[in-house]
C-alpha cells in the first residue's frame, strides 16, 4: 500500500515557477510508475506527466517543455517542476502511483492547489 501527500502548491503570476512535491509512505516508489494529473473546475482531469521505473518520462502536450517530472527513490519523493506557468495551468494537482503493469492508477494524493494569475 502507498500513501501519497502533495505539497508545494500556491499562487503565482504568469511566467513564474512552482515546484510540487509528493511524499510517499508505505512501499518504495521505485517499484511504481508515478505521475501527476490535474483538474480544474468544470474541466476533465488531465494527466500532466508520468515517470516509469526506468525514469522514462511522458508529458501532456500542454506542458511539454515547461514542466519536468522527477523522482528521488532514496527519499521516496516525486516532484513536478513547473516553469513558465500560464493561467490555464490553474488547477488542483494530484500525484498518483500504480504498478507499471497495471492499466489503472491505484493510489492518489489529496491534491494541492495551483493558481496562476
Image (tube, grey):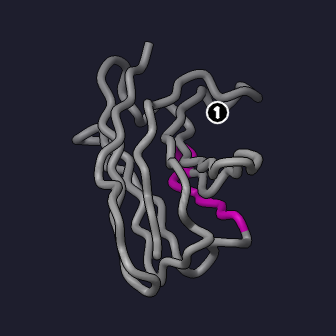
Pick whichever, 40 or 79, lies toward us: 40
- Residue 14 vertical placement versus 27 (above, below): below
For disc 1, the marked residue is 100
Examine the image and state in which quarter residue 111 appears.
Answer: top left
Question: How many numbered circles does the render carry?
Answer: 1
Q: Picture coordinates of residue 44 (x, y %)?
A: 76, 47
Pick whichever, 27 or 65, lies toward us: 65
- Residue 46 vertical placement versus 19 (above, below): above
Q: Picture coordinates of residue 96 (x, y %)?
A: 53, 35
Q: Is residue 55 magenta?
A: yes
Q: Is residue 93 magenta?
A: no
Q: Residue, x 55% and y 45% (percent of image)?
A: 35
Q: Picture coordinates of residue 23 (x, y %)?
A: 30, 37
Q: Which residues are magenta?
A: 51-60
Q: Which residue extends farthest top?
A: 1
Q: Quadrant of the N terminus?
A: top left
Examine the image and state in which quarter residue 20 appears.
Answer: bottom left
Q: Residue, x 33% and y 50% (percent of image)?
A: 21
Examine the image and state in which quarter residue 63 appears.
Answer: bottom right
- Residue 18 vertical placement versus 52 (above, below): below
Amino acid at each position: 500500500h502507498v500513501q501519497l501527500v502533495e505539497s508545494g502548491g500556491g499562487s503565482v503570476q504568469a511566467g513564474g515557477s512552482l515546484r510540487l512535491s509528493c511524499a510517499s509512505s508505505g512501499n518504495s516508489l521505485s517499484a511504481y510508475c508515478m505521475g501527476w494529473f490535474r483538474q480544474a473546475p468544470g474541466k476533465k482531469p488531465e494527466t500532466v506527466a508520468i515517470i516509469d521505473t526506468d525514469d522514462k518520462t511522458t508529458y501532456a502536450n500542454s506542458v511539454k517543455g515547461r514542466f519536468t517530472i522527477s523522482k528521488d527513490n532514496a527519499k521516496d519523493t516525486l516532484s513536478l517542476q513547473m516553469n513558465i506557468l500560464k493561467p490555464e495551468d490553474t488547477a488542483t494537482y494530484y500525484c498518483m502511483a500504480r504498478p507499471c503493469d497495471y492499466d489503472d492508477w491505484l493510489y492518489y494524493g489529496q491534491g494541492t492547489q495551483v493558481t496562476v494569475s
